[in-house]
Image (cartoon, helix red, strand yellow):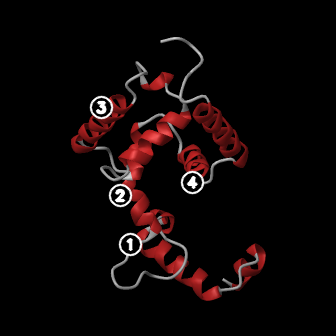
């Protein structure tokens, strides 16, 4: 065990001994299921357990939830015929609006947008560009100056 620790540069011979005992008793598959770190306290799930739960085959309720999400999304995007034609910004706005009704994870899984793209647009919604704010103020000032006329006879 000490030679193995020296060869692989591992500092804990006690762990290597435990691994060897597990391998001898239960076989190599047991070592593949081991988690790094300490054992969880108070019944908390480990990362590996949560991964196994999330990688479980999707059941029928998640499929119906996905259909509901797509239906609500197309209802929000009235001008666009399909989700594929929607821009990422529009999808992010729809997700931002539907967050109260559905879980964010379900929305991201159901719609053709990644989590990082959604977070990018969410950040842009919360902190708009200063240049755009100035331009909007100028346009609103001109609109009010010309007494809410567009410059074309009605």
Q: As drawn, is 150 to the left or to the right of 47?
A: right
Labels 2 and 1 touching (C-beta < 8 A): yes
Q: Which mark's residue is nearer the viewer, 3 or 4?
A: 4
Q: Which residue position holds label 4?
A: 126
User: First in sequence: mark 1 or mark 3?
Assistant: 1
Measured Cα–Cα span from mark 2 to mark 3: 27 Å
Q: Which residue position holds label 2?
A: 53
Measured Cα–Cα span from mark 1 to mark 4: 34 Å
User: First in sequence: mark 1 or mark 4?
Assistant: 1
User: In the image shown, does 135 or 27 lie closer to the viewer?
Assistant: 135
Q: Which residue position holds label 1?
A: 45
* Residue in the image at 49% along x and 64% along y: 28
Measured Cα–Cα span from mark 4 to mark 2: 34 Å
Quadrant for the N terminus in the image: bottom right
Q: In the rendered image of this protein, does residue 10 appear above or below residue 29?
A: below
| Residue 71 numbered mark, or none | 3
User: First in sequence: mark 3 or mark 4?
Assistant: 3
* Residue in the image at 50% along x and 22% along y: 85
Q: In the rendered image of this protein, does residue 102 appear above or below residue 110?
A: below
């Amino acid at each position: 065990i000490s030679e193995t620790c020296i060869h692989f540069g591992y500092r804990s011979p006690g762990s290597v001994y435990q691994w060897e005992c597990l391998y001898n008793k239960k076989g190599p598959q047991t070592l593949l299921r081991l988690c790094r770190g300490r054992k969880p306290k108070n019944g908390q799930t480990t990362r590996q357990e949560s991964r196994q739960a999330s990688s479980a085959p999707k059941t029928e309720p998640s499929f119906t939830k996905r259909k509901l999400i797509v239906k609500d999304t197309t209802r929000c995007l009235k001008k666009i015929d399909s989700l594929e034609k929607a821009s990422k910004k529009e999808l992010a706005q729809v997700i931002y609006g539907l967050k109260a009704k559905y879980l964010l994870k379900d929305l991201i899984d159901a719609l053709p947008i990644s989590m990082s793209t959604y977070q990018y647009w969410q950040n842009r919604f919360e902190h708009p560009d200063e240049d755009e704010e100035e331009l909007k103020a100028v346009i609103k000032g001109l609109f009010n100056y010309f007494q809410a006329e567009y410059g074309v006879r009605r």
